Each structure stands twice: as C-alpha cells, then as structure tokens.
Amino acid sequence: MKTIIHKASERGHADHGWLNAHHSFSFANYHDASKVHFGLLRVLNDDIVAPGMGFGMHPHDNMEIVTIPLSGTLEHKDSMGNIGVIKPNEIQAMSAGSGLMHSEYNHSKTEEINLLQIWVFPKVRNIEPRYDQRVFSAEEKQGKFKTIVAPVKAEDVMWINQDAYFSLGKFKAGTSVDYRIQHNTNGAYIFIIDGEATIAGNTLGKRDAIGIWETENISIAVNSDAEILVIDVPMN
C-alpha cells in the first residue's frame, strides 16, 4: 500500500472577494509540483461563491467535470441548451468532450454556495459533449458508500467517460466501513467533507484527504460524524 496525505491547511487558496477557493491540486495561479494530480484526478476545488456571483460563459474540452453542491444552489447554463439549478443531494456530471461553453452562478441573491468541482482526464478524447444532473437522497448515503458516478450507463449512477467511480457516504461516530478499490490499476482519493476518520493509520479531519493505491481494500474508522467522498481513479 502506498499513501499520500493532503492536509486541508496545506491546500492552495485564493480569495477573490466573490470567490473563496481552496485547491487540492495545482490550479490557476496556485502551483505545487507535488500536487498536480492524483492518477487521472486533475482538479478538486472547494469553492465558496458569494450571492448572485459566479463564473461567466467559458470554454472546456476533453475533461470530465463533476460538481457536488454542499450548501446553497447553483445555476448552470451551457452551449448545449441545458439550463438548471443544482441543490445539495444533487450531482452534476458533464463531459466537455470536443468542446462546450458553460456558466455557473450562485442562484441565490442572499446566501453563499459551497461546492466541490472535480475534474478527471477522459478515457476517450473528443467525444460528443454531454450533461447530466441527478438527485441522490441522503438516505442512500447513510451508513454506507453510495456510488454516484461510474463508467456504466444505469439509472442509479451518473456516467463518466473514464474508469473512475465517485462514492459518497455519511457515517456515525464509532462506526467503521471498508472501501474496495474497483480495479487493481486504480487508486482511491478519500476526501473528508466533514467530521473525522482514521484511514491507514492517519487521523484526518474536515477537508483533509488521503490518496491510497497498490492495495485492494481500505478500512475507515469514523471518529466523529463524518461525510466522506471517495474518488476511485486509474493511476495512469
């Protein structure tokens, strides 16, 4: 088993006034040669966006983009004609593929939004751009990991153009859970959204993360009520 620890306090940080952003990996003006990617996971941004503010129309191509609102509501528009509002317990997945334009704004004029935006390198380049948005109830994630993104087209997950799997779980203090990595060429990037857990002998708190690879099974001991995201991705 190999591991790497990314502490919340050591993430990149940019405060633009309307946007307070923390970067787990090198992004924009933040660069750390030791934190460029974890396998094919390229970006994990923890963004807080002021009321009514956001990202105007801008291009993307050849990237798989997953957005997870933690609080507040996000307004999405894109060049494919999709318009929608995404709330907590909803997930957005988008294949930028051969290229698209999109904008994302805080839908509320009075409350901040906190969201995770995650980029994964695609398996096949220049596919037709695609957008999806789904609800996953809190009950589905209670006491277990619920796979929310996977490289399969099914009703209970969102499809991704990569051999990657995203799983979310909410766990009570004093419980434990195992996570089995999907493929022997994959690793798991485990991000503590909230709470505290001990993983591979490391105690991790809110917004801390651990990358683990060259193993099959990962045991997680939950020290305080926790919400945990696992991003299971090819390592090369």
Image (spheres, rainbow, N blue to C red):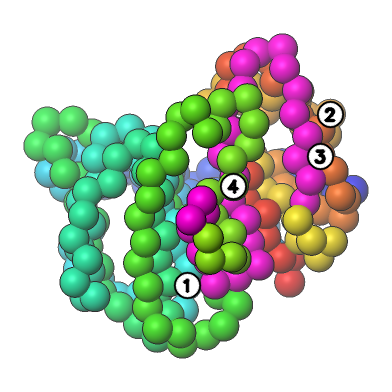
User: Badge 4 is on which residue?
Assistant: 147
Q: Residue most toward the front?
A: 155
The CA distance from mark 1 to mark 2 is 33 Å
The label nearer to you, 2 versus 4, is 4
User: Badge 3 is on which residue?
Assistant: 218
Please give the name of the residue rendered at 46% of the width and 87% of the height, measured from the top-left corner: 126
Q: Quadrant of residue 230?
A: top right
Q: Amino acid at mark 2?
A: Gly
Question: Could you tell which of marks 1 and 2 lies nearer the N-terminus?
Answer: 1
Query: Horizontally, is 194 left or right of 77 in the view?
Result: right
**Label 4 close to label 3 by CB (< 8 Å):** no
Question: Could you tell which of marks 4 and 1 lies nearer the N-terminus?
Answer: 1
Crowd around label 4: few <14 · some 14–19 · many ≥20 (10 Å):
many
Q: Amino acid at mark 1?
A: Met
What secondary structure is marked by label 4?
strand
- Highlighted magenta segment, given as a residue range: 155-181
Please give the name of the residue rendered at 65% of the width and 13% of the height, measured from the top-left corner: 173
Q: Amino acid at mark 4?
A: Thr
Residue 17 seen from this side: no
Q: Is residue 27 above or below residue 166?
A: below
Query: Horizontally, is 202 left or right of 205 in the view?
Result: right
**Label 1 close to label 3 by CB (< 8 Å):** no
Nearer-the-camera pick, 169 or 229 = 169
Q: Say whether residue 161 is magenta.
A: yes
Question: Could you tell which of marks 2 and 4 lies nearer the N-terminus?
Answer: 4
Please give the name of the residue rendered at 22% of the width and 48% of the height, measured from the top-left corner: 85
Crowd around label 1: few <14 · some 14–19 · many ≥20 (10 Å):
many
User: Badge 1 is on which residue?
Assistant: 63
Q: Residue 145 placed where, x, y %?
A: 63, 37
User: Badge 2 is on which residue?
Assistant: 201
Q: Residue 121 placed where, x, y %?
A: 56, 71
